[in-house]
Amino acid sequence: MIKAVSYCGGVAGQTVANPSEPPVNRSEDNVSVEGSTPEAALPEIDTSKPHPARMYDYYLGGKNHFAADRETAEMGLATWRAGRVAARENRAFLGRAVRFLVAEAGITQFLDIGTGLPTTNNVHEVAQAIAPSARVVYADNDPLVLAHARALLTSSPEGRTAYIQADLRDPQSILSDPSVREVLDFSQPIALMLVAVLHFVPDEFKPAQIMATLLDALPPGSYLVASHITGEHDPVGPATGARAYRAAGLPAQLRDADQFAELAFPGLDLVPPGVTLVSEWRPQGSGPRPTPAEVSWYGGVAQVPRRRVLRPRLVGALGILRVAVRMDSLWWNWY
Ligand SMILES: C[S@@+](CC[C@H](N)C(=O)[O-])C[C@H]1O[C@@H](n2cnc3c(N)ncnc32)[C@H](O)[C@@H]1O
């Protein structure tokens, strides 16, 4: 069944989208929403199929999910009993990473792909609490996130926020989006956020190419924050969850620490402690932390070097050029 958004849920005290105000292309002083045509009053939401944003909202204890989302989420939780703990740990990692970037690395621009439904500590809230002039562009491919995007767009007067509906698997369309270009200054460092989204891009979608396109577009000194579910510490729970996603038609792939690091951070300088369980990335407080099996989620933050190393693709192209030049000169010697 396809239906338009027709409810207004609330998450953790946040104001969420009012269905009587359609999320069409809207631009105010320092917020903008893009991704729906003016004639399409509300985005169409297929409630019969689960979607990662709504399932994640379910794990986090939000209210923006439908029966299909809950059913698939429960299939995963049946074996990965700590799935909710893991989701909370991932969300806390996101907050700590943004705080680090603003307070310690001086970053004030963010491109957050795979935003999720608005919840507590959205990127702009964390960033603007430290640097009110921070600018954030959110991007997600779930129309329900678009419907709720207003809650992501409560920018401080000094800052800017924007939301675009876009797919990580088409990175060029994100990079060339007018809102992205308008809100973010690509001559200054930007933090690319790929938190809990790369496991929705299995190898058949060529995620390494997607990463190369995104990382090549980042100015030197930029950062990448990424996190990824793994089966390394619990061979049953996360794998069963991933199977439930795939059975429901959602692409999903687990990766171990090396595969994740190689995919997300090639040629980047990892910020200590490097790729680690999200719960171990600069944890705060001295309270007990969940076990590796419960968390089963890697995260890391890395910086794009100020001097870029030539990527293999570029090196390969230069090699072909050199061979072509040599063959050309040989040809001239023969005649
Ligand atoms: C698990 S949530 C993560 C939300 C937030 N980044 C966090 O970590 O708290 C994953 C989000 O990625 C989005 N997503 C999944 N595949 C995507 C894709 N191909 N392009 C854009 N967004 C995608 C989902 O809609 C969902 O909102």
Image (cartoon, helix red, strand yellow):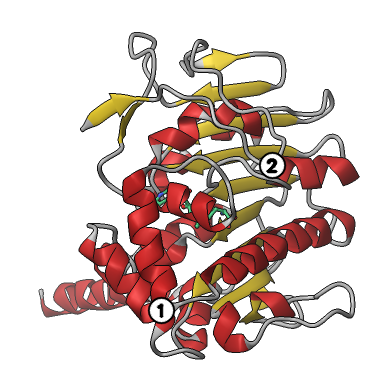
Q: CA distance from mark 2 to mark 1?
A: 27 Å
First in residue order: circle 2 vs circle 1: 2
Q: Nearer the viewer, residue 319 or 77?
A: 77
Q: Residue at x 27, y 78 (%)?
A: 323
Q: On the image, numbered disc 2 is attached to which residue?
A: 12
CB at mark 2 closer than 8 A to ligand 1? no
The reply to whether dot 2 and dot 1 touch (C-beta < 8 Å) is: no
Q: Nearer the viewer, residue 129 or 221?
A: 129
Snapshot quadrant of residue 65: top left
Disc 1, SS: helix
How many numbered markers are drawn?
A: 2
Amino acid under label 1?
Answer: Thr
Q: Position of residue 16 (x, y in %)?
A: 61, 28
Residue 42 appearing in the image? yes
Residue 304 appearing in the image? no
In the rendered image, the quadrant that contains the N terminus is: top left
In the rendered image, the quadrant that contains the C terminus is: bottom left
Q: Position of residue 186 (x, y in %)?
A: 64, 43
Q: On the image, numbered disc 1 is attached to which residue?
A: 79
Q: Residue at x 79, y 30 (%)?
A: 159
Vertical order, 184 against 169 (above or below): above
Amino acid under label 2?
Answer: Ala
Snapshot quadrant of residue 138: top right
Within-10-Å neighbours for mark 1: few <14, some 14–19, many 20+: some
CB at mark 1 closer than 8 A to ligand 1? no
271 vs 212, left or right, is: right
22 vs 39, left or right, is: right
